[in-house]
Image (cartoon, coloured by chain):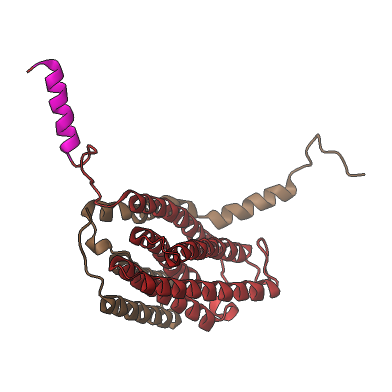
Amino acid sequence: MEIAHPHGYRVYGLCWLGLLGLTVLAMGVSHLSMAPAIKALVLVGLSLVKVLLIAAYFMHLRFEKLNLVLITGVPLLLAVIMWFMIVPDTRDTSRRVLVMRDTAVQAPAAPHAQPKP
Amino acid sequence: MSHSEALAAEQDRVLASAWGGGKSPFAANWGKLMMWLFLISDALTFVALIAAYGFMRYVSPRWPAQAEIFDMRLIGFMTFTLISSSAVMAMAVGAARTHNPKLAVRFLFLTILGGLIFLGCQAYEWSHFIGEGARLWSNPWGVPQFSACFFVMTGFHGFHVTTGVIFLLVVALRAAAGRYSDEGVEIAGLYWHFIDVVWVFIFALFYLL
């Protein structure tokens, strides 16, 4: 049996206004000159607040059982884990790609390659 | 207590526990729970796409300025449309739950209209982008990953919006024909809000960053 919760349109209206305000704020932040890492953090933070508003009120997660709320956090947790697994590969990757490209250019033709007629 | 009685007592104990099947640990009906599980798996796909985009962006020595390529007013309007349609969808679920099918159908059709406007804007944006010479593996700005990320991320999201519109249309037509189910409206609503959630991240990380 589901937990009863209110469906006031006023709540949805306030949530909608909040989302629009946060969208305008994010667009304003994108025009500011700041370090890319800080800008990324601010934009991700604003996005997370927006997602929390949508999930809590539009998707009614605020009124669901804690078990359901917890499993919806799994993608977020895996996103963080995935990012930290990718970060080591970003070191010197651009250099490695260039080296591979040079090697490919200098590599001799495959012994079994047939010239096109 | 005999062995069979002990087994029966153990079975009763397990069935009565929250995870034994005797109770509902998520306190949600079957359809709603399955939709949540689908959304979680779908979210993982988008997480992978966004992580791949982040990787390419991070290792790329340069990246085109999006504000000079895209019309940010159009992107802002698309975001406004999707957020508004999400709010209207929440109202449709509210109307369905308070057993007001006529109002729910009206809100559903408004949500569909929002989805169609979004798709129209996206089609315009794609045609404009392609018209400027952007292709999946190349573009005039010299960073092939840029257009690849754009087409894959927005394309996959657009595909979800399209299926969402079809899903809502089916639910709305069924509700209008009297085959009304508040659970069906709520499940469709979850899918539509998920589309909004994904767009929030694409908007911030691809267009604004």
Q: In the rendered picture, chain B carries what hue? A: red
Q: Residue furthest right?
A: A117
Image chain in brown? A
Q: Is residue B139 left or right of residue A56?
A: right
Q: x, y (%) of residue A72? A: 32, 55
Residue at point 49%, 81% (across, down): B77
Q: Is residue B7 above or below residue B67?
A: above
Q: Is residue A33 left or right of residue A56?
A: right
Q: Is residue A63 above or below residue B71?
A: above
Position of residue B52 relative to residue B84, above or below, is: above
Q: Is the N terminus of chain B in the top left, top right, bottom left or bottom right quadrant?
A: top left
Residue B202 in the image: state x and y as whole percent. 47, 67
- In the image, residue A99 sits, relative to residue B128, either above or below, namely above
Q: Residue at x 48, y 75 (%)?
A: B114
Residue A46 relative to residue A117: left or right: left
Magenta stretch: give its range: B2-17
Q: How many marks?
A: 0
